Amino acid sequence: MTRKVLAGVAVASCVAVTLVWALTGRGEFWPRWVYFGMVVPVAGTYVFRRALRSAPPGRRRWLAVDAAFCVTLAAVDLTVYVLSGGGYFWPMWTILGLSVILGLHAWVASRPPGKRERELLARVSTLSRSRSDALDRQAAELKRVERDLHDGAQARMVSLALTLGLAGDLLRRDPDRAAGLLEEARSTARSALDDLRTVMHSIHPPVLADRGLGDAVRALVLDLAVPVAVAGEPPARLPAATETAAYFAVAECLSNIVKHASATAAAVAFGDDHDALRIAVSDNGKGGADPAGGSGLRGIADRLEAVDGVLEVVSPAGGPTRVTIAIPLPRS
């Protein structure tokens, strides 16, 4: 039943008992108790809803609900006292007890949060930030893919369509020239396919889907200018989101080594922890890598936060540098 229906039933009930009272000789106005019984749940519902809406989740909301309960109970006792004819002011004991309860609750709510609560608050903050960052990265990635397709494959496909049209027009009049245009169209088609493969590789490398994280990293290091040794194997049956985040995190670390570390050798080592995916990326470069000093390592940390992962960087001046990636795995 909706609130309007309930309000209508309450009003009708109050009118009915008032008519009964009037038709039975009046006397003591006993319908006041019916009015009281109808008003209490309506007023209580309104007060509790306001309490829930006015306070943020957590300690303040529970304190607001407790205050709404105490105020409602005190108002009920005061109303009963007035309707029953007054006399000894017994509601003072109820009000005193409720004041003590509410005061103790307010004191507890004002205390600094405990360790567990601080951890939960930090966790909520991290999840909110990582969710926002993930949405921003997704939007940026979609724009990048759209731009790559527009500037690469789409432009080549338009050129391919025009070339094929010209070849069709020249097929009967100048077969030799038409054959040259067809060869040009074939080359354009190959280039468009290469562009599409590049875009697909940037979204989800095919080797990652076909061979798994270990082989994907080994394929990645083959094209680097710095020799990279890969040791160990990642756990089997990794979630797709975990594999993708770990792959691109390793790829960004290796890219930073090539660009900034001045290293002559690097290594990628998979840990043997069954509860988490651990990957250590190290190099013998000049060191001094700082997550707060550049966007590369910050981007890796933001990507890992989306899968509850963490990034640890040890890079003293002069090297060596060791970056550890840790992503918790779901329990089987």
Image (cartoon, rainbow, N blue to C red):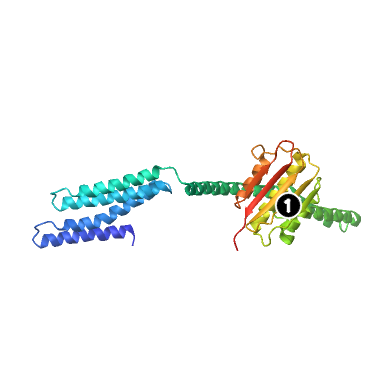
In the displayed structure, does residue 249 sit left or right of residue 75? Answer: right
Question: Which quadrant is home to the N terminus?
Answer: bottom left
Which percent across, then down, holds residue 129? 56, 46
Inspect the image, locate mark 1, and give the three-letter code of the amino acid beneath it: Ala
Which percent across, then down, holds residue 325? 66, 49
Residue at position x 66%, y 55% in the image: 277
Residue at position x 21%, y 55% in the image: 36
Q: Dot 1, how many residues are within 10 Å of its Cα: few (below 14), some (14-19), or many (20+)?
A: some
Query: Of 55 and 328, which appears nearest the observer?
Result: 328
Residue 157 makes an appearance in the image:
no
Which percent across, then down, holds residue 312? 65, 45
Tell me the element at label 1: strand
Residue 52 makes an appearance in the image:
yes
Q: How many marks?
A: 1
Query: Of 331 and 207, which appears nearest the observer?
Result: 331
Q: Which residue is mark 1?
A: 269
Residue 108 image-quadrant placement = top left
Question: Which quadrant is home to the C terminus?
Answer: bottom right
Residue at position x 35%, y 47% in the image: 105
Query: Of 151 and 7, which appears nearest the observer?
Result: 7
Which percent across, then down, holds residue 305? 60, 49
